[in-house]
Amino acid sequence: MTIDLINPEPRTPLAKRRWRCRSASALALTLVFVGVGSASAQAREGVDVGKNSAFSNLVPADQVERSSAEQYVQMMQKASEQGALAGPEHPQLKRLRTIAAKIIPHALQWNPRASHWRWEVNLIGSKQINAFCMPGGKIAFYTGILDQLKLSDDEVAMVMGHEVAHALREHARERMGKSAATNIGASLLTQVLGLGQIGQTVTNYGAQLLTLQFSRDNESEADLVGMELAARAGYDPRAGVTLWQKMGAANKGAPPQWLSTHPSGTTRIGDIEANLPKVMPLYERVKTN
Ligand SMILES: [Zn+2]
């Protein structure tokens, strides 16, 4: 009875303890979920380049993609008229399309718009050391970059990944947005002039889509995102180093077209090497599976 006097409800502490236990495990479970959620948000596997630039939002993505699709069609028609467009049975084109088919599935996580893109890969017969991916997933390689640099599949994947990364990160759209903002003033542009003026900016840029020189930051971003895309697709990201060494060596003769918009250098190779540990596990996982 003394027990009852001291503690009129002897079951309470036990009940409380049980509740505490349950609530503690519920809390622990919640923490696990929260922990997993925040861990995946904070420490995503691969490279870290932040969000797409807010300047892109000044120009509608569909306009940029439409403009680039028109440009692409014109270029391919011109190449075809000159007998310089590789047919679907060309072994090098088949090779490019095989590599693209492995890279493209990993593009979505960088830009949800990519699921609607009508991806195209073509090969143009030209000595130019050049390759590009226009907004909306319009890829082209020149035979010169494959033949003269004797690129391995891994190196092709690095070039393709880099170019696809420019498209996914919408660097052309960012450039147009910055240009529109500088020329007219962003608020004026959106509030007063409306989309017509932005459309004009896109049209003005349309013809320059292929020769756009991106900022050093954009280039570095494309290197990193590109090497991650290549690694996830099962291509050795260390090829980024040999690719730039080959580019550098070719530069001693006639400077490759690609280098005019992609300055080479030890900084570039250094950055690639520094980021290898972030993407090598992705590559190794694909290779062992
Ligand atoms: Zn680039």
Image: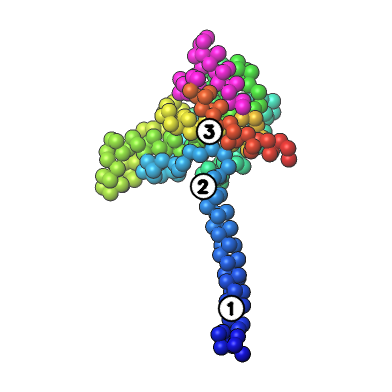
Residue 101 placed where, x, y %? 64, 37
> Which residue extends farthest front?
2
Between discs 3 and 1, the one toward the N terminus: 1
Amino acid marked by disc 2: Gln
Rendering quarter of residue 185? top left
**Mark 3 element type:** helix
Identify residue type, mark 3: Leu
Mark 3 surroundings: few (<14), some (14-19) or many (≥20) residues within 10 A: many
Disc 1 designates what residue?
Answer: 13
User: Who is closer to the viewer here, 28 or 146?
Assistant: 28
In the rendered image, is residue 83 in sight? no
In the image, residue 50 sits, relative to residue 96, either above or below, namely below
- Residue 38 showing in the rendered view: yes
Boundaries of the magenta span: 238-266
Q: Which residue is mark 2?
A: 42
Q: Main secondary structure of the magenta part?
A: helix
Query: What residue is at 58 percent from the left and 81 percent from the top?
Result: 12
Q: Label 1: few (<14), some or many (≥20) within 10 Å?
A: few
Q: Are marks 3 and 1 in contact (CB under 8 Å)?
A: no
Q: Image quarter for residue 2?
A: bottom right
Residue 82 against residue 113 in the figure, above or below: above
